Amino acid sequence: MALATAEQLGARTLLFGGADLGRLPHYLSPRAMDVPEARTLVDAVRRADGVIIASPGYHGSISGLVKNAIDYVEETAKDPRAYLDGVPVGLIATAYGWQATGSTLAALRSITHALRGWPTPLGAAVNSSGGLFRDGRCTDAAVCDQLALVGRQVYDFARLRTASGGGEPAP
């Protein structure tokens, strides 16, 4: 929903879902960057004017698949724009209860700061214990609004950054 909102505003989006992340070898394993999905992910991060990271909360933190994908951002360390330097990053944490949503969102914020990114003011914490999705659609208006706002903030801050000369718009 966050990506859909950004797309409706004019952004070009690319989703790396669970199946995509599952094809990534453990970062820094032999020949990890020889895998097409790894190269595609790193290239997308290099071109991105904004990023949205969503993770389920597993045992109080982000999932291993999401963390492994984030580790691939290390490939940009020596780039002119290292890591996510100055890039707006929207964050979404989902979990079956509030405790894990909060700690997962905090972990995502900490990781974003470590990668020099700018977490958006709103990070969406989605408690999925109430069955918020039916037939692939969100049934909770407040959650829908949160997810849309994450997409809007990433889009808006990316536009502001590129308009002010803080970065070149992605091709």
Image (tube, rainbow, N blue to C red):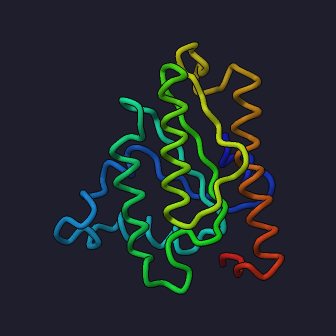
Residue at left 82%, top 78%?
164
| Direction from residue 161 to residue 74 in the image, left or right | left
**Residue 122 place in picture, x, y as percent:** 71, 43
Does residue 40 appear left or right of residue 164 in this picture? Answer: left
Q: Quadrant of the N terminus?
A: top right
Residue sitting nearer the eye, 159 or 8: 159
Residue at x 66% of width, y 76% of height: 170
- Give the left or right position of residue 99, taking residue 90 as reference: left
In this rendering, is residue 57 above or below 8?
Answer: above
Q: Position of residue 98 (x, y in %)?
A: 55, 22
Q: Looking at the picture, how far across and down is residue 163, in whole percent?
A: 83, 76
**Residue 82: horizontal and vertical position, in percent?**
51, 77
In the picture shown, does residue 41 fall above or below 53?
Answer: below
- Image point 38% across, 74% down: which residue? 75
User: Image quadrant for the C terminus?
Assistant: bottom right
Reply above or below: 130 against 57. above
Q: Quadrant of residue 26?
A: bottom left
Q: Residue furthest left?
A: 30
Q: Is residue 158 left or right of residue 64?
A: right
